[in-house]
Image (cartoon, grey):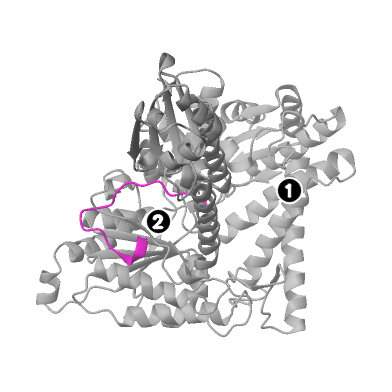
Amino acid sequence: MDFLPKNKLKNNKVPEKGPKEAVKKGPNQPKPFWNSAAGILFAFIVLMIIYSFIAESGSKTPIISLSQLANDVSSGLVSNITIRGDELEVEYIKANEIKKAKKEDATALTQTLVNYGVPLAKLNTFQIEVKSETGFGYWFLNLAPFLFPLIFILILVWLLSRQVKGAGMQAFTFGQSKARITFPSDKKQRVTFKDVAGAKEAKEELKEIVDFLKSPKKFLDIGAVIPKGVLLMGAPGTGKTLLARAVAGEAGVAFFSISGSEFVEMFVGVGASRVRDLFKMAKTAAPAIIFVDEIDAVGRVRGGGVGGGNDEREQTLNQILVEMDGFEQNEKVIVMAATNRPDVLDPALLRPGRFDRRVTIDLPDRNDRVEILKIHSAKKPFAEDVNLNVVAERTPGFSGADLYSLMNEAAILAARENRLKVAQFDLIRSIEKVMLGPERKSHILSVEEKEITAYHEAGHALVASVLPYADPVHKISIISRGRAAGYTLKLPLEDRKLQSRREFLDDIAMSLGGYVAEKMIFGDLTTGPSNDLQVSTALARDMVTKYGMSDKMGPVALEGAGGRVLFGRGMDDREFSERVGSEVDAEVSRIMSEAKQKAEDILTKHRKVLDAIAVKLIEVENIEQAEYETIIMAFGIQPKKKKEFVSAKQNASL
């Protein structure tokens, strides 16, 4: 099979002295122990134990009756009696022994002792001292049995009510914006144009925005109005978000970032409320930049009724349109948005006065890829054999995100093998891992399957080497990667922005090389060419219906850039008759048949080369470009070089 590289601000207040670092608790983060019901219950039990110890320590003094006290007084054993309310603390002469007793209510102690038969003469032999019942210990011991349970119940009720309030009050915070903000004083998150490699034209366009935010007076004095909205368009991973952050970093302004999907909630009107809140915060922090990522989530064409359209999304879009119209020239708030589907956006969003500045960010070319690789390799130790130019040559169609993943995978491979430096071999292996997936070493092919796969991939490679407009082969492998049992890696000699009809036809013939090789060698077919047939058939249909590359159909575009999606399946708007559809099918079939015949002629003529490549593949499983070119040169097939490749195209065009 052949694989080609695929191309809040809290409470709405803006801090004046820059952001303060804080740790935000996630919804699943456990609460502190003392902030839970279990913690309160544990504290209550500990206090009860402490109180019991205090109460027990206070009750060790022996208690005697009034009759016993009267006998002791009569016997002259008592030296002092202290009255504390209705409690008597009796101190004896012998060894300073202390005992306690209870006095009668509303009766004096001396009268009580006389009533118990104590002689009046004995009442003068000891001292009677009256002390008022005050102090923390008295009140603690008397009130603790009532206060502790009451305090425990109040704290438990407060804790439970706060948890219920926290869950119930979330409905009242739906209208607040969830934008993430980066202040210019935050050096750790600041990004400038130096951190963005490639995209030279896009950076030149965005420098005007930076100049306006830094010094708007020179624009306003001459009557110029800076665009209110800037729409960044490009394939996924090309650095749209990074460029937006770089504009804010270069201008030194606050950067409000939010995703288009964060505006839409289950409650109608929440999205519009969040839009108002977001713009209000940005105006307060002006000069500022509002960045809406994936704006097509709320900015799709209104009234379609297909693809999740609803009143909530349309109300959100209407509010965005109103807020952008309400800007004044001197507010210094610019809206930036990113999307990889500008074709589905509502026309009102793209009209002059809103997103009237559109910046297209293309995939990086070879030189840009080298610069991007240098940025991503800044903190990685490289071996002496590393050549980033070779890596850039092998990665056409890679986006900035793909190149970041490539460098990261290379570092992981080196660390996994306990090496301290990243070698060129790691970078080459990581290219295939990013494009096709990891090696499936456990997926061992049988002898028959290995032979079929070898001839299949050899058929792809040989047809690509013979056809003048096919890209040269860089590697052939029959080691499983991802969902593929084997692969033929062919890469262009130089980056291309346009592709010709002849190149398409040679690509289709190359894709059918594996199909033809299986049928020619084994007289049967497997499921291996299924992906090849899908890719080549889709390419042939695009040639007929989109690119006008069919002589029979002529220069007519029969299909748009993309259809709608209904119930998870594509739904194309066919704007041609059944007769034209039949002719399209016949033309696609003709292109496929001619490509199949072309591949069959090449493999028949160069059968010995096909066998040699297949045998070598079965033996070593991987054939790199240099070794492959040695094999085909032995049979008189010259490998494509850059100058010869270009001149061959020029001669053919003449």
Region rendered in magenta? 7-26
Instruction: Give the number of the disc on residue 115.
Output: none
Q: Nearer the viewer, mark 1 or mark 2?
A: 2
User: Badge 2: few (under 14), some or many (20 or more) residues near its Cα, within 10 Å?
Assistant: some
Counting from the top left corner in percent of width and height, residue 402 is at 50, 45
Residue 417 relative to residue 138: left or right: right
- Residue extending furthest toward the top: 95
Relative to the observer, which residue lies in front, 246 or 199? 246
Residue occupied by mark 2: 241
The answer to which of marks 1 and 2 sits earlier in the sequence is 2
Q: Against 167, is 408 above or below? A: above
- Is residue 8 part of the magenta span, yes or no? yes
At label 2, which amino acid type do we have? Thr
Q: Residue at coordinates 75% horizontally, 41% vertically from top-left?
A: 603
Rendering coords of residue 546 (x, y %): 60, 71
Dot 1, crowdedness within 10 Å: few (<14), some or many (≥20)?
Answer: many
| Helix, strand or loop at mark 1 | helix
Q: Is residue 329 left or right of residue 169?
A: left
Q: Nearer the viewer, residue 589 or 604?
A: 589
Write the residue at 31% across / 68% down.
Answer: 281
Image coords of residue 79 (percent x, y): 38, 23
Disc number placed over residue 599 in the picture, else none:
1
